[in-house]
Image: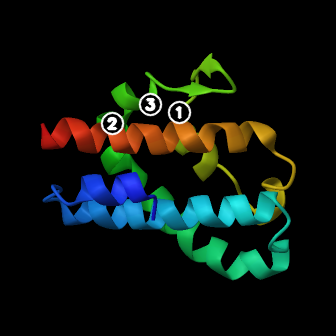
Amino acid sequence: MNPFTQFLRQWSKTPDLDTFILYWDRLEKLTIQIYRGKMTVDEAQPEFEVIWPWLRARYGRWQAVLEPFWRDTHAGGQPVQTDPFQLLLEVRSPIDICGDWRMMQHLPAAREALNQYLMAKSA
């Protein structure tokens, strides 16, 4: 888990959000491993088949809550114009991650939105 997110989660009283974040961590880790060639598409497939459907089924609950936070983020040095969570959840196969620099640029925006939301909630 991202250390800063882990720190911020200590004040979270929302088990559903905690579980969502744990699955998002898995999505990030798998995405990075595939992109960097540290895991093959075939090796990633079983984990992908667990993570992506689970997050897709539950993102709707968090989409409106997280929107104001991702709108204040950047990807590739530019303000984010696309929901970074949705962008990543639209991936249909691990092969789609290979070489997708735009997707990699949006990973930090999603993480920042989660962290900003957790900070706002704890204030």
Which mark is nearer the camera, 2 or 1?
Answer: 2
Tag 1 near tag 3, CB within 8 Å: yes
Disc 3 on helix, strand or loop? helix
Disc 1 on helix, strand or loop? loop
The CA distance from mark 1 to mark 3 is 7 Å
* Circle 2 residues within 10 Å: few <14, some 14–19, many ≥20: many
Q: Which mark is residue 83?
A: 1
The CA distance from mark 2 to mark 1 is 15 Å
Q: What residue type is labelled 2?
A: Gln
Q: In the rendered image of this protein, does residue 71 appear above or below residue 12?
A: above
Q: Nearer the viewer, residue 16 or 22?
A: 22
Q: Is residue 70 left or right of residue 18?
A: right
Q: Earlier in the sequence, mark 1 or mark 3?
A: 3
Q: Is residue 8 left or right of residue 99?
A: left
Q: Name the residue under label 2.
A: 116
Q: Mark 3 points at which residue?
A: 70
Tag 2 near tag 1, CB within 8 Å: no
Q: What residue type is labelled 3?
A: Trp
Q: Which of marks 2 and 1 is nearer the N terminus?
A: 1
Q: In the rendered image of this protein, does residue 86 appear above or below residue 73?
A: below
Q: Quadrant of the C terminus?
A: top left
* Circle 1 residues within 10 Å: few <14, some 14–19, many ≥20: some
Tag 2 near tag 3, CB within 8 Å: no
Question: Quarter-wise, where is residue 103 in the image?
Answer: top right
x 85%, y 74%: residue: 40
x 38%, y 44%: residue: 114
x 52%, y 44%: residue: 85
